[in-house]
Image: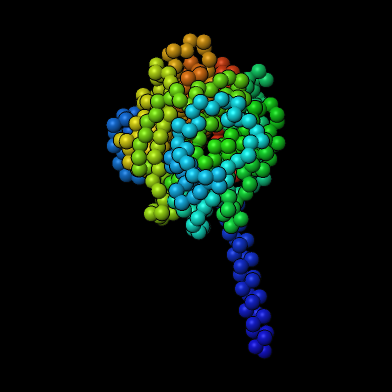
């Protein structure tokens, strides 16, 4: 009798573990991904000296509280060690590298090691190790197919002479997460996921590969620790990969002016209940080389507001510093470079990962039209036709490709 009770208790325990794990897995898959609390129509950005009030507000794409993280100016995150050895690796360490070395495939990646235990935040899909947090990522094939279909449907409508660049950015959990902790992490392989997404595209699009170049620079400060976005340096490497796909030379890293702002506490800081183990980020921005730029964004109400392409983030509260890039998330914006007169133009269709990426394009086009498809109400095909655009750049982070709501908005 006693043995039966023991067997029963063991059986119930095993069943509870299996059931709990399945429920957790289901919640991750159905969570639709996360892009953080995006700041929309942030008019204060028009004035670099303005002091924003309060914290970021929720937006309707915030389906669940996941996010992405990163590191500071050290070679690896504080509390983590590169197996290759410690050393300084801030933005300056990549200066002078030829483009070919940045995008060459097959280069062995440096290892990253973590010392601390994983702290899981199941309600937000966030994991913290040492002084950085990350968003768990789970590949969902049906959603990836829907994303690819949305892209394919667009290119199918466009004239075959129009170039379409599709950029899907990996997130920090797929690039900078400590290698010795991955076995304990319930997160899909992003390299495999990106390969699957590329295979689903029609082939008419130019899929810009980012995984390899970001992995080659994974011990640098390319993702924030306390926020789900990449840093300006991470976006710079994406820009280099785009230039390689386009067949042009990117600007050298050393040619950019840098603006730094301390004390950035992004979405992960909130999603980990303001865990003090997280080390505040530095927003180190690379400013476009061209000085004769104009930038104007349009709010949902139709107000047109001038702003810097890259603002000084010191005037913003700790949670809003990412708004330094193209004034945050607005439905429609335009950058004009008065030093370029060749009529070159493009349209960037983006979510917030595009914000840090777009400033690098400002040195290469006379006019850049920027649409945040989450908030813009219009017909993209008609817009492209009306403006006689020959280049379309789609940029999203990989979490978007499992977000049913955002895929619907893009479609």
Q: Nearer the viewer, residue 97 or 380?
A: 97
Q: Classify 209 as above or below 193.
A: above
Q: Residue at 57% across / 46% down in the picture?
A: 111
Residue 229 seen: no
Residue 27: % across, % down: 57, 56
Residue 253: % across, % down: 48, 26
* Total numbered labels: 0
Q: Classify 19 as above or below 94.
A: below
Residue 217: % across, % down: 54, 37
Residue 272 seen: yes
Asked if residue 148 lies left or right of residue 315, the reply is right
**How did the renderer colour the structure?**
rainbow
Asked if residue 152 lies left or right of residue 406, the reply is right
Q: Nearer the viewer, residue 311 or 381?
A: 311
Q: Nearer the viewer, residue 381 or 164?
A: 164
Q: Please identify the residue farthest to the top as the structure is shown.
A: 341
Q: Residue at 67% across / 80% down in the picture?
A: 7
Q: Residue at 31% across / 29% down in the picture?
A: 47
Q: Nearer the viewer, residue 212 or 396?
A: 212
Q: Classify 86 as above or below 97.
A: below
* Image quarter hosting the N terminus: bottom right
Asked if residue 198 lies left or right of residue 322, the reply is right
Q: Quadrant of residue 298?
A: top left
Q: Residue at 33% across / 41% down in the picture?
A: 317
Residue 70: % across, % down: 48, 44
* Image quarter hosting the C terminus: top right
């Amino acid at each position: 009798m006693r043995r039966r009770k023991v067997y029963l208790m063991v059986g119930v325990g095993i069943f509870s573990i299996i059931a709990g794990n399945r429920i957790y897995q289901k919640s991750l898959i159905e969570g639709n991904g996360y892009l953080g609390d995006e700041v929309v129509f942030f008019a204060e950005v028009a004035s670099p000296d303005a002091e924003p009030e309060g914290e970021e507000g929720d937006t309707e794409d915030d389906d669940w509280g996941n996010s992405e993280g990163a590191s500071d100016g050290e070679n690896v995150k504080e509390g983590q060690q590169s197996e290759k050895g410690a050393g300084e690796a801030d933005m300056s360490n990549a200066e002078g590298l030829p483009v070919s070395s940045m995008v060459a495939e097959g280069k062995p990646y440096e290892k990253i090691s973590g010392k601390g235990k994983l702290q899981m935040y199941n309600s937000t899909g966030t994991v913290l190790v040492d002084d950085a947090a990350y968003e768990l990522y789970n590949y969902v094939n049906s959603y990836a197919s829907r994303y690819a279909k949305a892209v394919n449907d667009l290119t199918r409508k466009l004239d075959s002479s129009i170039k379409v660049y599709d950029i899907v950015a990996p997130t920090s959990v797929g690039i900078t997460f400590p290698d010795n902790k991955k076995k304990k992490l319930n997160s899909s392989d992003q390299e495999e996921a990106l390969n699957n997404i590329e295979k689903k595209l029609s082939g008419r699009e130019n899929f810009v590969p980012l995984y390899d170049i970001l992995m080659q620079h994974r011990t640098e400060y390319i993702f924030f620790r306390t926020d789900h976005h990449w840093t300006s340096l991470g976006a710079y490497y994406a820009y280099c990969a785009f230039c390689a796909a386009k067949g042009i030379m990117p600007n050298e890293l050393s040619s950019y002016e840098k603006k730094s702002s301390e004390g950035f506490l992004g979405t992960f800081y909130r999603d980990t209940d303001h865990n003090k183990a997280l080390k505040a980020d530095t927003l180190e921005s690379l400013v476009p080389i061209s000085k004769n730029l104009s930038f104007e964004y349009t709010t949902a109400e139709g107000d047109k507001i001038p702003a810097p392409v890259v603002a000084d983030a010191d005037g913003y509260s700790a949670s809003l510093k990412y708004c330094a890039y193209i004034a945050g998330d607005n439905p429609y914006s335009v950058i004009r470079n008065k030093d370029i007169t060749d009529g070159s133009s493009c349209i960037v269709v983006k979510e917030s990962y595009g914000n840090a990426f777009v400033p690098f394009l400002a040195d290469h086009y006379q006019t850049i039209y920027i649409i945040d498809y989450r908030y813009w109400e219009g017909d993209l095909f008609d817009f492209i036709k009306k403006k006689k655009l020959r280049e379309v750049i789609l940029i999203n982070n990989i979490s978007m490709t499992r977000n049913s709501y955002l895929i619907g908005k893009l479609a």
